[in-house]
Amino acid sequence: MEPERKPLSLLELCVRSAVDNLRYMNSVDNLEMGLLKRILPHCTLEQLTHIESCTQMDLTGVTDVLWKRFFQREFGEADMNVAIKRMKESGVRYKWKKLFEAKTEKQKQVEQRMSAGLRNKYEAANAAKQSKQIKVCTKIPPNSKRSFWGGSGSSSLSNSSYKSPILKKARMEVDSRAKMQAAIQRNTVARSSQPARLTFPSDQTSRTTTIHRPNSTITITKPTGPNRPMQKQNTRPKF
């Protein structure tokens, strides 16, 4: 048979209830040190900090060992041994809570300096990168007609065109078309620039020609003046 379990005392029930509700605990001024030694070791770092800030009496006799444990957990055993060694050499004993706060503040300052240095390096690298991009975008070449391989663009284009038979033929066709178009334009301008010639009826003379055929007689009147068409008149068949 299993031995009968003794019922928990009222004090044990209170301690267990206090441990289960540490996140709601504030001031412990009215509790005895014996109870605090059983309750406070179950606190986290945030819970212990909150309880001590709400309590007026000094809890060093109970919490100094707890702060030493937190110091070792956060910063390592090597830093804890260094702190102990320095206190022995100086002959002064400090509270582990104060040592923990001082070490935390020092570590924050180191992290801030490191982050500031990294931020400055990043900003400098970013600024140098942007300045290089701006220089590349705003740089103006000394001669805009220079080709990729050097020399002027027109000379390189002509050299490349004469090297290729297809480009040479296309160039010749373009030149011939341009010459033909220029000739047409010159003729049009020359024609439009000549003065118009007027013909008066008094300046015109006519010449009549009669053609005899077996069945008809045709009379043709032909003007001797400029720009006059020939007229066929008096066509009459003979019977």
Image: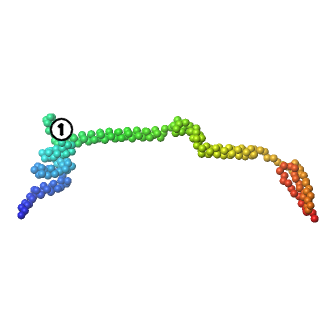
Of residue 165 and residue 184, the one placed in the foreground of this image is: 165
Residue 213 position, x and y percent, is 91, 59
Q: Give the residue furthest to the bottom.
A: 239
Does residue 239 appear in the picture of this structure? Answer: yes
Q: Residue at x 73, y 45 (%)?
A: 187
Q: On the picture, is 69 further left or further right than 230?
A: left
Of residue 195 and residue 9, the one placed in the foreground of this image is: 195
Q: Quadrant of the N terminus?
A: bottom left
The image quadrant of residue 60 is top left
Is 146 situated above or below 239? above
Q: Secondary structure at mark 1?
A: helix
What amino acid type is highlighted by mark number 1?
A: Val
Q: On the picture, is 34 further left or further right than 232?
A: left
Q: Please name the residue that numbered disc 1 is placed on.
A: 82
Mark 1 crowd level (few <14, some 14–19, many ≥20, 10 Å Cα): few
Is 76 situated above or below 210? above
Q: On the picture, is 93 further left or further right than 230?
A: left
Residue 136 position, x and y percent, is 46, 39
Is 97 situated above or below 23? above
Q: Residue at x 85, y 54 (%)?
A: 230
